[in-house]
Amino acid sequence: MTTLISDSLRALKKIQPPGGIELLSYKRNRGIALIKKQDDLVEIREHGYEEQVLEVTIDKLEKELKTMIKREFPRSRKVRLIKFADPRELERERQKI
């Protein structure tokens, strides 16, 4: 959990658009999806306590991600980081624990 933001940004740099990463709570009932639109533009989809979609540049991504992580994973010790190549993979039903 301590290196989540830096790991997320590092993984996102290596991914080609329109791919991205998804951060899920351990129980998979809340999450944040980061979809790389262009090399400098990222779409953030938050689902859990709040439902919202934002488009931000890479420079502002860290600040937005930090506030969303505090809101969606307030007491979490484990967060799942899943990479995907196509945003349609986000719509599939995941197993809940």
Image: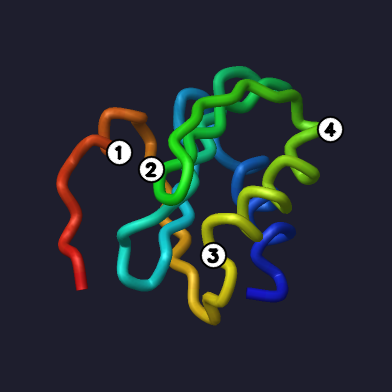
Q: Residue at 55% of width from left, 33% of height from top?
A: 44
Whole-number angstrom distance, CA of label 4 to CA of label 2: 22 Å
Q: Residue at 65% of width from left, 60% of height from top?
A: 70
Q: Residue at 61% of width from left, 43% of height from top?
A: 12
Among numbered discs 4 and 1, the one appearing first in the sequence: 4
Q: Are the two marked residues, 1 and 3, in contact with CB atoms closer than 8 angstroms?
A: no
The amino acid beneath tag 3 is Phe
The amino acid beneath tag 4 is Asp
Whole-number angstrom distance, CA of label 4 to CA of label 1: 24 Å
Q: Report the residue marked by disc 1.
A: 90
Q: Report the residue marked by disc 4.
A: 59
Asked where in the image residue 92 lies, by quadrant, the reply is: top left
Among numbered discs 3 and 4, the one appearing first in the sequence: 4
The amino acid beneath tag 1 is Leu
Among numbered discs 1 and 2, the one appearing first in the sequence: 2
Whole-number angstrom distance, CA of label 3 to CA of label 2: 21 Å
Quarter of the picture containing the N terminus is bottom right
Q: Are the two marked residues, 3 and 2, in contact with CB atoms closer than 8 angstroms?
A: no
Whole-number angstrom distance, CA of label 1 to CA of label 2: 8 Å
Mark in front: 4 vs 2: 4
